[in-house]
Amino acid sequence: MSRPEDTLPPDLFYNDTESRKYTTSSRIQRIQSDMTHRALSLLSLASPSLILDIGCGSGLSGEILSQTPQYGTPGGPHVWIGLDISASMLGVALEKDVDGDLFLADAGQGVPFRPGTFDAAISISAIQWLCNAETSEDSPAGRLSRFFGGLYASLRRGGRAVCQFYPKNETQKKMVAQAAIKAGFGAGLLEDDEGTKNAKTYLVLTVGGGDLDGDITGVVRGMDSVHVMARPGAKAAKRGGDIVKGSRGWILKKKEQMERKGKVVKPSSKYTGRKRRVQF
């Protein structure tokens, strides 16, 4: 049986008919609810938060976010903003009068929000669609890079994102995780029902704040079985090659971080980081 993302782009696959069929399916509603609750437990939010729902569709996940928070989060429901590429899906969400604000956008072209806007983000059954190139000028690597780069910039420092997705194979799973790491995230993978046809993969992402322990064999604090991927700079640290503040490597890293946040950065050259001679 072919996967939906192998047949048509999501904005064409989820037309009016398919969007309504997806939204009214009791089986889909149950699965989406379970996965959203699982993602919320992994986010481990301490207070009502502003959450970005990537691939929000008709608002099935958003309805869970709008309920009174669980998992030790007092003070009322979360506030959420949904982003999806399917106008038909968003149309159904509008008919249902969901609580979140809705944006029609392609996550493969980036996340169109100001830096540091969100406390957290979730994505349920969506990012595997980014692994397919829709035009000859595009590529899965480019789409994933733009998405994770934009997501990283849109989250506040210390923020966390949980992306549930269905990788086609181990190669695709690694491609997604490595794209997140390259964007600057600390990343961990969790498998529910591993080895079964109901297997679900969760990519747990953090923006600074020291939420991830260890590197490739560590676990996310308080979350046994979330296996942490190699973090940016982990290899250099193991070799004792920590970047010295003020060095060329340190400057280039800082410039890269600023670019990801959407700031204007002067181009690098062979003189970047070079010490000036003392003038008399």
Image (cartoon, rainbow, N blue to C red):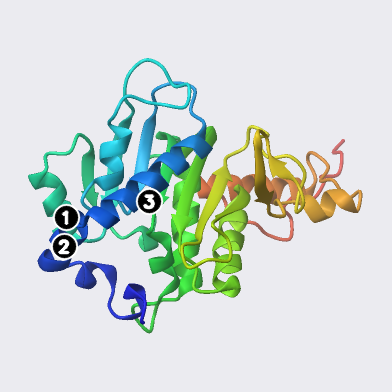
Q: Amino acid at mark 1?
A: Thr
Which quarter of the picture shows residue 78?
top left
- Name which residue lies at 52% across and 39% down: 42
Q: Which residue is mark 1?
A: 24
Residue 66 x %, y %: 27, 31
Question: With 178 as the anchor, is 232 left or right in this view?
Answer: right
Residue 268 x %, y %: 64, 56
- Name which residue lies at 45% across and 48% down: 151
Answer with mark 2 or mark 3, whichever residue precedes in sequence: 2
Q: CA distance from mark 2 to mark 3?
A: 28 Å
Question: With 222 as the anchor, is 23 left or right in this view?
Answer: left
Q: Amino acid at mark 3?
A: Val
Q: In the structure shown, which secondary structural element does the residue marked by tag 2 occupy?
A: helix
The answer to the question of whether label 1 and label 2 lie on touching residues, with beta carbons closer than 8 A, is yes
| Residue located farthest toward the bottom when viewing the structure as drawn | 136
Crowd rating for badge 3 (residues with CA inside 10 Å; few <14, some 14–19, many 20+): many
Question: With 193 as the anchor, is 2 left or right in this view?
Answer: left
Q: CA distance from mark 3 to mark 1?
A: 28 Å
The answer to the question of whether label 2 and label 3 lie on touching residues, with beta carbons closer than 8 A, is no
Answer with mark 3 or mark 1, whichever residue precedes in sequence: 1
Looking at the image, which is closer to me, 228 or 242? 228
| Residue 111 marker | 3
